Image (spheres, rainbow, N blue to C red):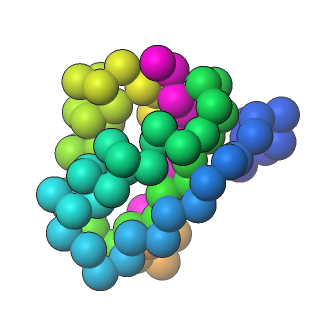
Amino acid sequence: MSKTKSEKVSLILDMKGEECSTIRLELRIRILEIEKDNLIKLITDRPESVISLPKWCNLNGHELFLSDEKDGEYIFYIKRRI
């Protein structure tokens, strides 16, 4: 996690219990609230997010900056690029 110390987390989205489609929609809307090159920290409990969120980032021009899994929670740091 030290990689994020020099980066600014502008928004934290706790999406535990939500379906992946809801997570992607919320992320699409909320990422516009932060400045370019800042991060959203997204927390989910959906194992399939490990596949769907990197694809979402690639398709939408954003960067999956860092991801981690701990105790059944999946944590993603997504950098707004456009």
Numbered marks: total: 0
| Residue at the limit of the structure toward the right, as seen here | 6
Q: Which residues are magenta?
A: 74-82
Residue at 46% across, 26% down: 63
Judging depth in this view, the residue of 12 and 46 nearest the camera is 12
Q: Residue at x 44, y 49 (%)?
A: 30
Image coords of residue 47 (percent x, y):
26, 64
- At x 54%, y 43%, the residue is 33
Q: Note whether 4 is above or below 26 in the view shown.
A: above
**In the foreground, 30 or 9:** 30
- Main SS of residues in magenta: strand
Q: Quadrant of residue 35?
A: top right
Q: Can residue 69 be seen in this snapshot?
A: no
Image position of 13 with respect to 63: above or below: below
**Viewer-side residue, 49 vs 9:** 9
Q: Quadrant of residue 2?
A: top right
